[in-house]
Amino acid sequence: MAEITRPTPPEELNGAPIEEQIIQMAKLSYERLPLLEVIFDRFALSLGPALKSYCGVLADAELESFDYMPYAEALEGLSANGLVAITQASEWESEIATVLDPDLLFTALEIMLGGRTVKGSDWTPRSFTAIERRLGTNVCEVILRELSTAFSQLSDNEFSIDHMEGNPHTLVLAPPGSPCVRVTYKVTLDERVGKLSFVIPNTAIDKVRPTLAQAFRGGQLGGDDAWRALLTDQIADTSVTLAAVLHEPVLPLTSVLQWKRGQVLDLGIDSEHEVTVTCSGKKMFRAAMGRRKNGSVALRVTEDFDNAKDMKEGGFSDVVSD
């Protein structure tokens, strides 16, 4: 994963009173979103193949940075000549920004228009033409489809383009001083390099911030349904050994040492006494003993220790046969 960066306090605060430094440091403190970091890190793995399929050339995407910073600072770090797709996030009911810098945009356009064998040309900043906007929109749609897939492991979030703009510095998605996340990728198309950025204000993810702030301990996000189904089927067919413990009395060692073969032991229980069923030493449930019509000893589950649920309505199930 790319290095996670956060703003550092301005140098002019070094001589300021300690109270002022504490206040400013508090303003620069941002809550980490570990799950969001993981999603965007893994998004790079699928973005490269998607662009390769769309453009028809070798493509690679690398997460360059994942930054927590003020919204105004995030915009200042973007190219003023980039093409911006104002992106609607259905699950969040808010907007984020998807930004193609000129190098990436015009590399994609030249390749798609048959100029892959021509060395990349310099571009003079100007307004985008209708064709450039349209082809840039198509590239953004490919990117956002993959982003929707990346988030599908966590929730059904659909990213779609609301409209296109030509200058990232004029975006008004949040107050200038509000916290946000800026994610930057280095995208390589046919050995030409450009950058793709996402600007996500914290206000856009208010609904899912508790989920995104959870610690990620590895493994799948949301899991692999096919693998889970296979594993469930295999576990369901696995045989386990259950032990029905009738009673566990506490007796003095002297009495136990005096036991002889054939001696009848009084456990101090009656026929209504319930047994405790264990599996590998773990208590599973409590059950009442009985017999079925065929003479087999059976148990009726009365209490499930795992679920702490009363199951007195359950029927008898075979445990051992006479």
Image (tube, grey):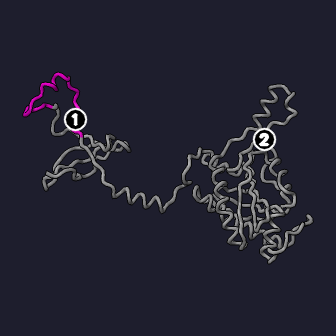
Q: Which mark is residue 292?
A: none
Is residue 103 in sight in this rendering? yes
Please state if 25 lies on the left or on the right of 33 as rendered: right
Label 1 is placed on what type of residue?
A: His
Is residue 248 on the magenta stretch? yes
**First in sequence: mark 1 vs mark 2:** 2
Is residue 97 in sight in this rendering? no
Magenta stretch, overall SS: loop
| Image location (x, y in percent) of residue 221 | 56, 54
Query: Badge 1 local density, few (<14 within 10 Å), some, or many (20+)?
Result: few
| Image location (x, y in percent) of residue 198 | 74, 56
Please state if 271 lies on the left or on the right of 12 as rendered: left
Residue located 67% across and 59% down the image: 44
Give how far apart the Cα atoms at labels 1 and 2 are. 64 Å
| Residue found farthest to the bottom | 114
* Numbered range of the magenta stretch: 245-266
Establish if 50 lies above or below 214. below
Q: Which image quarter: residue 293?
A: bottom left
Is residue 117 on the magenta stretch? no
Q: Secondary structure at mark 1?
A: loop
Looking at the image, is mark 1 or mark 2 nearer the viewer?
2
| Image location (x, y in percent) of residue 119 | 85, 71
Q: Label 1 belongs to which residue? A: 247
* 250 and 118: which is toward the camera: 118
Residue located 65% across and 60% down the image: 45
Label 2 is placed on what type of residue?
A: Pro
Q: Which mark is residue 7?
A: 2
